[in-house]
Amino acid sequence: MTRRTYILCGIAAFMQALATTVGLAWVFAGKDILDIGVESQQRMRPAKGPVEPVGMGSGPDQIIAAVHRDTGRVFVRTQCNGPSFAEFIGIPDRVRVSIPPAPPDELIPMWAREMSLPWLSGTWPRGADVDWREVSGSGWPMIALASEYCIAANRAYERRFGIELAGKRRVSGGLSPTRSPRMLPLRPVFPGFFVDVAAYAVAWWGLLMLPFAVCRWRRRRHGLCVRCGYDLVGLAVGLRCPECGAG
């Protein structure tokens, strides 16, 4: 094999790895998420309050988070209540109350925190306003691409880093909606995107190189030059091929 062949195979393997990473992320992005998920809520201002399970009620200056995980996909939904949000008492689910929840910012995967919790470093909702964020990530073996779906206080919907498709997908859980938009994610998630591309590039490189390796093995087995296929039977061992000069 020539250096040019190695380079072309490397480029082809990389392009195929990109296509595989994006393709699998898009396939998983449209599938339902049946995991019941984990949820928690916490008052963040003026000082942090205790972490509570979702269902204990909701009040002002609270952040509520739900995270659902399934094979090849993660769904995160967060809610932020303004300082004048009307407090109400909920009916807690005994199963959820029996499980001590983690704080919302620790519950959410690292790659999704910036998109799903913008209020911690940005503008807090005013008055009785409520802001929502839905962040979906997909990919395998690691989450590679993500999309964001925002619902503002005026009920204006904004889609970011994704292409919305027709229909909805089902997401289980209390805080999360029963139906969520089907979106093709476009935002790379690091380091998952790099890991997936690297893993598939190695696999594609092996597949592309396999025919050349088999060809070399067959030629060597039948006493032929591994480069050009010239018959070397009868020639002294160690001599170069008289046809192409390969050693």
Image: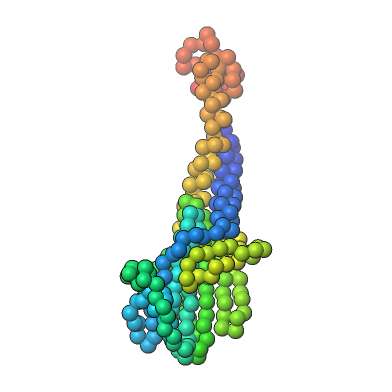
In-image side of 21 versus 50 (left or right)? right
Image height of 216 relative to 35, above or below = above
Look at the image and tell me whether residue 222 can be seen: yes
Picture residue at 50% right of the left edge, 55% below the top: 72
In-image side of 190 versus 17 (left or right)? left
Way the structure is coloured: rainbow
In-image side of 34 versus 154 (left or right)? left
Q: Position of residue 89 (x, y in %)?
A: 41, 84
Question: Viewer-proximal residue, 141 or 197?
Answer: 141
Say how many tags the image has.
0
Q: Position of residue 125 (x, y in %)?
A: 50, 85
Picture residue at 56% right of the left edge, 43% below the top: 13
Quadrant assignment, res 95:
bottom left
Question: Viewer-proximal residue, 127 or 14?
Answer: 127
Instruction: Give the residue at the far top of this rendering.
Output: 234
In-image side of 104 versus 28 (left or right)? left
Instruction: Give the residue at the far right of this rendering.
Output: 166
User: Which quadrant holds the N terminus?
Assistant: top right
Look at the image and tell me whether residue 44 can be seen: no
Image height of 100 relative to 199, above or below = below
Question: Viewer-proximal residue, 54 or 138?
Answer: 54
Picture residue at 57% right of the left edge, 33% below the top: 2
Picture residue at 52% right of the left edge, 8% below the top: 234
Q: Position of residue 112 (x, y in %)?
A: 47, 67
Image height of 110 relative to 9, above or below = below
